Amino acid sequence: MTDEIPEHIRNLTRLEVMRAVREGWLQAKNLDGTPFTFPPSEIPAKPNPRQKPKLSIHKTVEKRSRNYKMRVETYSNQNAQCYYCNHHKRFELWTLDHKIPVSRGGKEGNNIVGACSMCNTLKACLTVEEFLEVRHDQKLLKSKVIAMTLEIAARKDREYKTGKSV
């Protein structure tokens, strides 16, 4: 069957698929072939008298939306495979990671890759090359992360004391 749903899309939860379709990142069709559309958003939600009103900050909402879009894009582009361990992962475990950490001068753009949460956590402040060297030896990995964390903290301390970027 040529219209089979790819595995990395099948692993998305219903809520994630609905959100992606609503925001235009995925396209869906009804069984009769017409484009799937959501009910009008003008329908007001029933207010909960016990719940405090949530304050929404525009920048936070915009950033979350952009991060979600980037997660969906990297998940699809990388065919649900972690950049570091090459294992297929569910979308809930999918995170964005900087190949060169921001703390070490990394920027956005081509520096962003999709990774499973386990690899992203283990990688911490290491570059890709440093992480791939030591990822199979937990003791070496831990000592390398601690050493880099201390080095970054010392650099930031020097920057703070001198008032200049080192």
Image: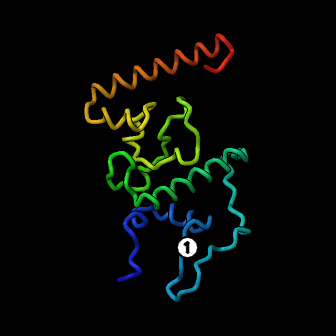
User: What x and y, as percent, mark residue 61?
Assistant: 67, 49
Note whether 30 is above or below 158 in the view shown: below
Residue tagged 1: 27
User: What x and y, as percent, mark residue 24?
Assistant: 61, 67
Residue at the bottom extreme of this rendering? 32
Q: Is residue 103 left or right of residue 141?
A: right
Q: Is residue 118 left or right of residue 35?
A: left
Write the residue at 41% across / 80% down: 3
Note whether 84 is above or below 14 in the view shown: above
Give residue 78's quadrant in the image: bottom left
Residue at the left extreme of this rendering? 137
Write the residue at 69% across / 46% down: 54
Q: Is residue 61 visible?
A: yes
Write the residue at 58% across / 43% down: 108
Where disc 1 sits, the SS reads loop
Note whether 37 is above or below 131 in the view shown: below
Quarter of the image with the N terminus in it: bottom left
Q: Is residue 108 left or right of residue 120?
A: right
Q: Nearer the viewer, residue 61 or 141?
A: 141
Near mark 1 (Cα within 10 A), the count class, few <14, some 14-19 or many ≥20, is few
Badge 1 amino acid: Gln
Count how many numbered circles sit on residues in the image.
1
